[in-house]
Amino acid sequence: MSKKTVQNTFEIYELLRAGLMYPSIVYIPIDTVLEYVEFEEIAELQEIMQPFDRLWICESLEINYHLEADTDLQLLLKKQDVLKKNLFLLIDYKQNLEPEQFEYLEKNYKQLLYVCMYFSQEMLRVLKVSKEKHLKKYLHLFELQDIHYQKHFTAIEETFPSSEEEKKTWYTSDTINYEKLKENIPLDNNRDDKTSKKVKKKRQKYITDEESQMYLLESVFNIKID
């Protein structure tokens, strides 16, 4: 029996993380950011980055630009293929890595995937209730992105099932229902606004620790928030 290869787990994770997060279409309302930082910090960040209340295309950590009318969106069509490649890579890594390495890799990848799904669905909800025409015209792209994440989540869970203990930390009655995720059903357009706000507040408490909640802001825009 061949000996398993010792590889740099962090470098592998960074490769998978890039495939999970990029390319992506991003919209972060300033109201959402204000839930985590003070208004004075927002003003400073806006002067440097101007990332909020604008539609962004994120090709990589280094390549981010505003989504304009003439932006080539073909790269977003690659999202599904990139996520599928990540799944096959994980299958290979399970065969080639030491058990402890793969266990750590799998745990962190699933956590980041859940965070990506959370933000994807939050962005989708914002756009669905928005009255801004320039946001509405791109709604179908956010729906497609969210479906890709849901399908990838389902594929990951079918290939590397989470334990019941792990599921308890990922899902609660106030968060995303696992069985509904497997159905890949689009979010309800007729959701009650008051209920939506209440659920959102509880979900922020359960999703992950604070570091994970900030991960996308820091990774996509390279913004470090204390």
Image (tube, rainbow, N blue to C red):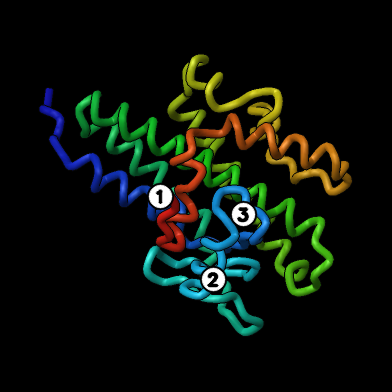
Residue 162: x and y in percent read 47, 23
**Disc 2: which residue:** 46
Which amino acid type is shown beneath numbered disc 2? Gln
Of residues 122 and 44, the one nearer the viewer is: 44
Between tags 3 and 1, which lies in front?
Answer: 3
Q: CA distance from mark 3 to mark 1?
A: 36 Å
SS of the residue at dot 1? helix
Residue 140 located left or right of residue 78: right
Q: Is residue 82 visible?
A: no
User: Circles 3 and 1: CB distance less than 8 Å?
Assistant: no
Which amino acid type is shown beneath numbered disc 3? Leu
Of residues 31 and 15, the one nearer the viewer is: 31
Residue 137, image quadrant: bottom right
SS of the residue at dot 3? loop
Residue 151: x and y in percent read 58, 42
Q: Is residue 30 visible?
A: yes
Residue 199: x and y in percent read 74, 35
Between tags 1 and 2, which lies in front?
Answer: 2
**Disc 1: which residue:** 85
**Disc 3: which residue:** 34
At x 32% / y 35%, what residue is drawn? 105
SS of the residue at dot 2? helix
76 vs 201: above or below: below
Counting labels gives 3
